[in-house]
Image (cartoon, grey):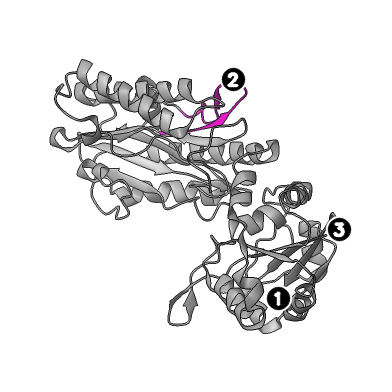
Amino acid sequence: MTADPNRPRLPVSFFAANRENLFSCLGDASLAILTSGRAPHRTADEDYPHWTNRSFLYLTGLDQADAVLALHTTKGEGHVVLFIPETDPMYERWRGHRATLEEAGQLTGIADVRLLSGLPEWLDSQVQRPGLILWLDESARDGQAAELRNQLAERHSDLLARAQNLEPFLIQLRMIKREDELAMLDQAIGLTDRGIRAMLRRLRPGQMEYEVWADFDHALAEAGCLNPAFASIVASGKNIFCLHYMQPFDRIRDGDLVQVDVGAWVGGLCADISRVFPASGRFTAGQAALYEVVRQCQETAFATIAPGTTLAAVNEACRQTARQGLLDAGLMQPDEAITDYFWHNVSHHLGLDVHDIANREALLQPGMVLTVEPGIYMPTRNLGMRIEDDVVVTENGCRVLSRRIPREAAEIEALMAQARR
């Protein structure tokens, strides 16, 4: 595997800095081991597509299955060893090229790259060190991670019994995004915008949900993104009340709202954007009233997000805004509970994963990237929607990264009219 010059990629220095930051979390005589993962079996002789463990990718930049990263500290110095599978002509004939030792070194900036077959002997030599502390990423639960734990149990059971969980350190590091990541995320958001505009060129009564869904994937594929950041959602009519709607086989009807929840990924970074569109091209009075309440919730979130606050505080502020907005619009009675209509949290962390690893109770800090996606759902009125944008926490508040994607109701209607010309 070599770096493709046509695909955006985070610089090697980014991954080297991440390793150094992890070393600063580890004490002396530590050994941290991460696996890149292995795709699960799908059916017959087919596996699911491989998706490299995101923490392994964060530390190496190597997008390849069955690799192992070892970081060990000795007398205050950190050392990195990368183990990769042997080259196999028969494997590559069917599944494609795997990085050589030299290529893996160039892709990762790691000087010491070895064949995976040497890992057991290398581990045997490491465990002889007195007072060694083993660190494992306990969030990894794929076949390769399980195989590694089994090998450690057979050969070094005492060490495994004392193993510490590396995940809290990885969470701490990955929650703060650097400029390189924000640049990639900006590209992912721009590509998502392109995909949404492609969807609108088709979206109108009579189309199938999957036809609109296909236009988003096609726009991404034209830019070299062959898989979206997550399974795209295109839900019309009653389907908007299924939050993770995965069966886009209904026909869009006049008067329907069409909820889309989509995202591209570029250089490993994921965008996550939601918009709701009136199939007819214009919101009805009731739809427009609810849209305004959801937008008020978004503005509340934008104003609340700042260093030192929490996601729980953002959620509560939006719930209060939603309640007052629905009361003012005559869409809710005073004796009703807002939780009947406000079904999910407003924010999650975003990064190498769409729902990026995070401590949801942690105080917000500059550099954290969040979604802002308030949603209100009222099945008895056949009204429901969420509007989602991506933001980065700044020193004084937050900056909306997806501000270029039309968000206001009038902008949505104008964009739909333009797309239909």
Of circles 1 and 2, the one toward us is: 2
Instruction: Tell me the magenta residue range.
Output: 388-405
Q: Position of residue 415 (x, y in %)?
A: 40, 27
Residue shown at 62% from the left, 69% from the top? 65
Q: CA distance from mark 3 to mark 1?
A: 30 Å
**Element at badge 1?**
loop
- Find the residue positioned furthest to the front: 131
The residue that label 3 is drawn on is: 75
Left or right of residue 74: residue 157: left
Q: Which mark is residue 396?
A: 2
Residue farthest to the top, as pictured? 328
Q: Secondary structure at mark 3?
A: loop
Q: Residues within 10 Å of mark 3 (few under 14, many from 20)?
A: few
Secondary structure under badge 2? loop
Quadrant showing the N terminus: bottom right
The amino acid type, in three-letter code, at marker 1 is Pro
